[in-house]
Amino acid sequence: MVLWKRPGLTFTLAATAVLMAACGTGGNESAQTDNSSGGDKIAFLLPESKTARYEVADRPYFEKKLTELCPTCEIINGNAQGDAGKQQQQVEAAITKGVKVLVIDPVDVKAAASGVSQAKAAGIPVVSYARLVQGAPVDYFVSVDSFRGGQQQAEAMLTALKAAGKDKPRIVMINGSPTDSNAEPFKRGAHSVFDPAGVDVVREYDTPNWDPTEAQRQMEQAITSLGADGFDAVYVTNDGMASGVIAALRGADIDPGSRYVTGQDAEVAALQRIVAGEQFITLYQPIKKIADTSAQLAVNLLRGTAPTGLTTTDQDNGAGKVKSILLDTVVVTKDNIKESVLVDKFTTAEQICTGAYAAGCEKAGLTP
């Protein structure tokens, strides 16, 4: 969930280089490409590349696992660059190329129904990746528990605010894209914590395409209408938007560290902001597990075998019940970066602790 190619938002060049090397492709492509080895074809279609994780984490993880499980499989890659119409074209092109399984992270969960229905009509099984396609039959859905994620963000924020003596906090909410199936559960999860606690949500926005620039504009609007002292914290669903929010706070001469800004995705830039005291928390999604599980399911569907060792729940997408694997997110603060993202080798201390962030890393015990 998630969006970022703004200053201070992308993974470091070193991280990108390492992960792209694992990927073996140029990444960020808007057209489809074949990673061919002469066997059955599996399509892996991503929604956009503003979110840094997609091309530097999700794609290489998926490709690596799929190649391990099916060395002769061909991978047809696509990135729609935030364009639902382009993604529809990529689905149709994949069908024409004879893919045997479609793995898709939809740009727009409702608009994707048309292409997914075409794939199913052609006898192609579908794995909905990270976001659940709505209104079309899907074989599996692999993601995180978004409702619980929203609760985790809100709980961490309220705990810190109460410790600071803010028993009736005033919070600005910057929610995710209304076209993303994960955005609404995150928002509901946060509200399920805020509302019973008597939180005053003084402004609330939904942010098209999780756009950091739009999040910055929304935060600037909130500051203008509320004043610098009119809010105590900013609930933000992901790290990309958090960067825009923090830019708006800085622009208004407000210390970002005083406003408990939340996030999600454990981007390197967000982890740097956390050790610098500018961002309060992020949520770490087990992206490798999501990608690995999706690759495993794709091979199971290709071979007609039943998956083992996976706990599924049913999610209704408007076209029926979808077998879903929902993985847990982890709240990451400066105190547990080492035990979470570093232990999982999602990133490294060297990538986080560069330049101006070295001092913060030393205080957090993250010195490379």
Image: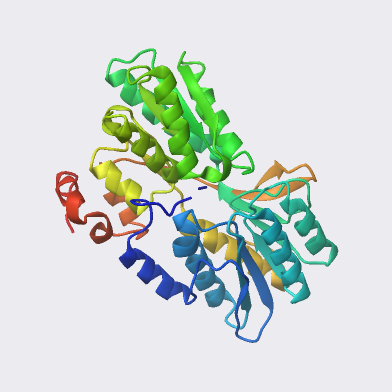
In terms of image quadrants, where is residue 330? top left
Q: Residue at x 29, y 59 (%)?
A: 348
Q: Residue at x 57, y 41 (%)?
A: 208
Q: Is residue 305 visible?
A: no
Q: Measured from the top left, where is residue 37 in percent x and y?
A: 60, 85
Q: In the image, is 144 to the left or to the right of 53?
A: right
Q: Nearer the viewer, residue 139 or 1?
A: 1
Where the C terminus falls, by quadrant?
bottom left
Q: How is the image coloured?
A: rainbow
Q: Is residue 74 visible?
A: yes
Whether 302 is drawn above or below 138: the answer is below
Q: Measured from the top left, where is residue 229 in percent x and y?
A: 32, 17
Q: Nearer the viewer, residue 276 or 149?
A: 276
Q: Residue at x 20, y 50 (%)?
A: 357
Whether 173 is drawn above or below 364: the answer is above
Q: In the image, is 343 to the left or to the right of 189?
A: left
Q: Measured from the top left, where is residue 78 in percent x and y?
A: 61, 67
Q: In the image, is 134 to the left or to the right of 270?
A: right
How many marks can you see?
0
Whether 44 is drawn above or below 284: the answer is below
Whether 224 is drawn above or below 57: the answer is above
Q: Measured from the top left, where is residue 228 in percent x and y?
A: 33, 21
Q: Residue furthest right?
A: 121
